Image (cartoon, rainbow, N blue to C red):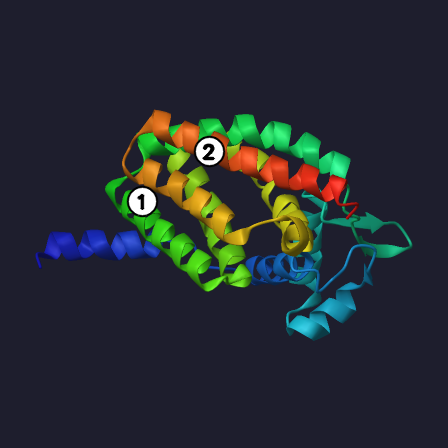
């Protein structure tokens, strides 16, 4: 390896953002809320969460503020922090926005993603397929999160990030609460895989169509929860 190449690699490695304690706290708390380990309506405190996660109160506080912006918790003066309720009507309104934003993001990612990112999309498609075969809901949720983070990064649009970050956690939590009664995880995983494959192929129109098919399925699932009285 040439000296110049080694230096470029070193700079590239140094440029990668390290995961902060706040990031770790946010990731852990978001998954606990999405997987209903912290159920809707649950009252929590910085001290309790700090002890449970083994992370200081300042990162916990910062993570809770981020979760409040994403509507997963409510911070109430003099009452503490409450995990937000799940609202089906709000979920349907959320899907109206997801359809339009994610169609754009998928198309932009297909157009602008780097060769390395396209390889990552191919890998995520395989992982979605594997989760479908295994019926592994937890793996599916974690892959889904990585997939949407990569979509936003590959779209090269900083405004998409601020919008998507407020939509995905709420959608994942709703899905996790109801999918065993009204959903089909393998089908959802395969629809996600189709979007990832289209982006990897650099096919903007196919990515948009695959994304619409995915949102169609999610909307049908959401309406089925209403019909089932869930």
Q: In the displayed structure, does residue 104 sit left or right of residue 122?
A: right
Q: In the displayed structure, does residue 120 sit left or right of residue 36?
A: left
In which image quadrant can residue 53 be found?
bottom right
Residue identified by numbered label 1:
117
In which image quadrant can residue 131 be found?
bottom left
Q: Earlier in the sequence, mark 2 or mark 1?
A: 1
Is residue 62 visible in the rendered structure shown here?
Answer: no
Tell me the mark number nearer the camera, choosing from 2 and 1.
2
Residue drawn at x 69%, y 37% is 223
Of residues 36 and 163, the one drawn nearer to the viewer in this rendering: 36
In which image quadrant can residue 221 be found?
top right
Q: Residues within 10 Å of mark 1 (few under 14, many from 20)?
A: some
Residue 43 has which mark?
none
Q: Position of residue 161 (x, y in %)?
A: 52, 37
SS at circle 2 = helix
Q: In the displayed structure, does residue 187 sit left or right of residue 94?
A: left
Residue identified by numbered label 2:
211
Residue drawn at x 37%, y 51% is 124
Of residues 229 and 141, the one drawn nearer to the viewer in this rendering: 229
Compared to residue 204, the image places residue 6 above or below, namely below
């Amino acid at each position: 390896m040439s000296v110049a190449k080694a230096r470029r690699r070193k700079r590239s490695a140094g440029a990668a953002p390290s995961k902060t304690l706040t990031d770790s706290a946010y990731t852990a708390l978001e998954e606990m809320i999405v997987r209903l380990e912290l159920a809707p309506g649950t009252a929590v405190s910085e001290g309790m969460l700090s002890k449970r996660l083994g992370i200081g109160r300042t990162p916990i506080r910062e993570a809770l503020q981020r979760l409040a912006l994403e509507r997963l918790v409510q911070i109430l003066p003099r009452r503490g922090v409450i995990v937000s309720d799940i609202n089906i009507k709000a979920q349907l309104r959320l899907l109206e926005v997801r359809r339009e934003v994610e169609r754009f993001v998928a198309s932009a990612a297909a157009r602008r993603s780097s060769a390395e990112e396209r390889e990552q999309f191919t890998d995520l498609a395989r992982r979605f397929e594997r989760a479908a075969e295994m019926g592994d809901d937890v793996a599916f949720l974690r892959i889904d999160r990585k997939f949407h983070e990569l979509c936003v990064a590959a779209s090269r649009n900083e405004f998409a990030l601020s919008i998507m970050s407020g939509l995905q956690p709420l959608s994942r939590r709703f899905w996790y609460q109801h999918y065993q009664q009204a959903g089909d995880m393998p089908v959802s995983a395969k629809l996600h895989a189709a979007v990832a494959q289209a982006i990897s192929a650099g096919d903007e129109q196919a990515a948009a169509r695959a994304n619409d098919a995915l949102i169609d399925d999610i909307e049908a699932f959401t309406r089925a929860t209403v019909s089932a009285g869930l």
